[in-house]
Amino acid sequence: MKKTFYSNGKLLITGEYLVLDGAKALALPTKFGQTLNVEEGVNGEIYWISYDADGSIWFEDSISFSEITNPINTKAETVKNTLVTILHEAYLLNPDLVNNSSGYQIKTQLAFPKKWGLGTSSTLINNIAQWQQIDAFTLLNNSFGGSGYDIACAQNDSPILYHLEKGKPIVDRVSFNPEFKENIYFVYLNKKQSSKSSIAQYQNEKAHSLDKRIRTIDTITQQVLNAETITSFAQALASHEAEMSQVLAIKTVKEALFSDFDGEIKSLGAWGGDFVMVIWDENPTTYFAAKGYNTILTYEEMILSQ
């Protein structure tokens, strides 16, 4: 019998990096996600095929149950090795994955281009967790790592305020439906950024004490949530960019790439790649297209409505 699971993609609006250390982060589930279809298989293996948004196959292979139960230790970060790691940890949480099956045929389908960075891994992990009826946050922590805000987005259809409390995820649904959302755009920077490597870099470079930084980001996050005008919203985001620029010791994306832009630009998630959020009182398509950035989505096109 065919089983189907779905998870939402994600965008981290505030709290990037510092969310790992307890900062409160505003995150928005996207209209784009990933589907996982499971059917019975044979030969004690999983035949796995993954489709990108355009219908092209980006991964296809067979994984034996023995590879899942006793994975070979390797440092090669291939798609298959990453998938085997996730499936092995799922097996440890629920041995029925292997013990009560003759095999599986699995198809995954992205609703967004894989390069966009809206949560290819997090939507997969959450889908596998749904399928195996295990805790997705535990599966993430045991396999891929990260704060878990992306798992929370995968599971929720509305904006969330997310933080870690003694390592445990705290998820609060919040109201975020600004009247000026027609002035919010999302621009893809044509550079896929690895969350895993960005987190590792942050861990290496962060200061010993981040308590003050976290309090500042928490305050700004609340200002973003409470903003009633486009001006106060943009000012809060500019403050956030300036604060994180100091934490990471790198220029803001506006300073680095768009210093002549009149509106505000906010990095999202891992700095240096994927999407940025643009706030302007005009449609910025012409400006960004002239600089070679042609993937521009409106708030309505990108974000799940409340």
Image (tube, helix red, strand yellow):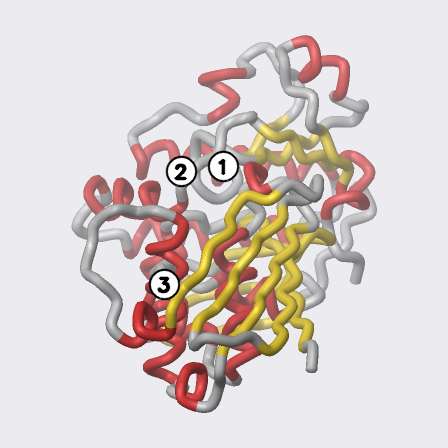
Element type where label 1 sits in the image: helix
Q: Amino acid at mark 1?
A: Ser
Q: Residue at x 69, y 82 (%)?
A: 1
Furthest residue in direction front, as rendered: 43
| Image position of 237 (left or right of 251) | right
Question: Of the numbered discs in the image, which one, if any, rests on residue 204?
Answer: none
Q: Residue at x 64, y 58 (%)?
A: 34
- Dot 2 alpha-carbon crowd within 10 angstroms: few under 14, some 14 to 19, many 20 or more: some
Earlier sequence position, callout 2 versus callout 3: 3
Q: Residue at x 77, y 37 (%)?
A: 298
- Residue 237 in view here: no
Q: Which residue is mark 2?
A: 243
- Work out how far the residue at label 2 is from the one at label 3, CA to CA, in angstroms: 38 Å
Proximity of marks 2 and 1: CB atoms separated by less than 8 Å: yes
Element type where label 3 sits in the image: helix
Q: Which residue is mark 1?
A: 239
Proximity of marks 2 and 3: CB atoms separated by less than 8 Å: no
Earlier sequence position, callout 3 versus callout 1: 3
Q: Is residue 80 above or below residue 95?
A: above
- As rendered, which of 101 and 163 lies closer to the eye? 101
Q: Is residue 92 above or below residue 303?
A: below
Q: Amino acid at mark 3?
A: Val
Q: Which of the 4 image quadrants contains residue 49?
A: bottom right
Image location (x, y in percent) of residue 107 = 61, 61
Image location (x, y in percent) of residue 169 = 44, 73
- Residue 156 in view here: yes
- Dot 1 alpha-carbon crowd within 10 angstroms: few under 14, some 14 to 19, many 20 or more: some
- Dot 3 alpha-carbon crowd within 10 angstroms: few under 14, some 14 to 19, many 20 or more: many
Image location (x, y in percent) of residue 246 = 33, 33
Q: Amino acid at mark 2?
A: Glu
- Work out how far the residue at label 3 is from the one at label 1, CA to CA, in angstroms: 41 Å
Q: Which residue is mark 3?
A: 84
